[in-house]
Amino acid sequence: MANFPHKQRGVALIVVLLIVAMIAIIATNINSRNQISVRRTINLAQYDQAYWYALSAEELAKKVLKQDLEDADEGKIHRQQYWAQTDVVFPAELGELGGNISDMQACFNVNALSMETKEVENGQPKLSLPATQFKGLLVALGMDDFSAERLTHTLKDYIDEDTVASPYGAEDADYESRTVPYRAANTLMSHRSELRAVLGFSQDIYLKLAPYVCAIPGNDRQVLNVNTIEVEHAALLAGMFDNKISVGEAESIINQRPGDGYDTIEDFWANGSISGLRTEQNLASSFSLKSQYFLLEAGAKVDSATFRLESVLRVAGKSKLEVLTRQYGGQK
């Protein structure tokens, strides 16, 4: 009985040590959670700041375009203007912002394939001019004639308003029979990445075609600005002429273009390779020296937080630009 109080003191010591250990664990856990909460708050604040920096890049792009349009001779757009500068980066507090502006009329607007035609050829509806030009682009990129025509029809059916399949096209029944069924959009595209949903446009075809095409929201016309198309995209110019000129000739035409672009569209048509093609299928309406739609690809970074933004800008007047669409995170 003499050792009983001593045993009680030992048990009490163990209990006290357990309590201290539990308190230490709880305190450590609380501290860790506080650190995570603080880090999360900082990340949210940095991400939010990067978002506003990206929007400021949009405002800066509008200002640059407005200035170029005011300085332009009769609205002429060319690649020696301020908007065409690449990889522009501006320092900002705790970070930076930058971006590129590209002319959306220096690419092929896939929405133009929605144009209907009542002309008939060999008992079938004849392809519209934009559809013929899109097929020409595919051929210029190395695709055989039949595959190019098939893809042109499937794309036309995907975006046109009716549900009647073209001879080589595809409508709802074809999409509903797929492993993951869906329906044809039957409306204009908002981004070129939607091509991935069109029957026949594999990933390889899409990646090869992507640098040459775009989707202008709400616009169903194909007009190429001959002052802003780059020599790397000469296949597009050849396709616009349904390959009646070669890609090499298209490269030569672009390389012969003055540094500040053609002064008049007549200067463009004066080139011997194309002068005789102007009256074919009303081709003259497919080319211009002006542009109305631009794509801003902007990015902002604040510490470790980054934000990407794509904005489609439309010229609504000589001194006014408006944002048609915004996409966050970037698309390919």
Image: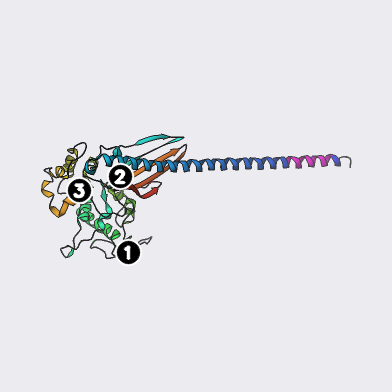
Q: Amino acid at mark 1?
A: Asp
Q: Is residue 114 above or below residue 258?
A: below
Residue 243 in percent (x, y) is at 17, 49
Task: Write the start and end of the magenta stretch as one range.
Answer: 6-17
Question: Residue 16 colored magenta?
Answer: yes
Residue 119 in percent (x, y) is at 17, 62
The residue that label 1 is drawn on is: 172
Observer-nearest residue: 126 or 299?
Answer: 299
Question: Residue 154 colored magenta?
Answer: no
Residue 2 appears in the rendering: yes
Q: Residues within 10 Å of mark 3 (few under 14, many from 20)?
A: some
The residue that label 3 is drawn on is: 287
Which label lies toward us, 1 or 2? Answer: 2
Residue 49 in percent (x, y) is at 46, 41
Which quarter of the picture shows residue 9? top right
Q: Amino acid at mark 2?
A: Ser
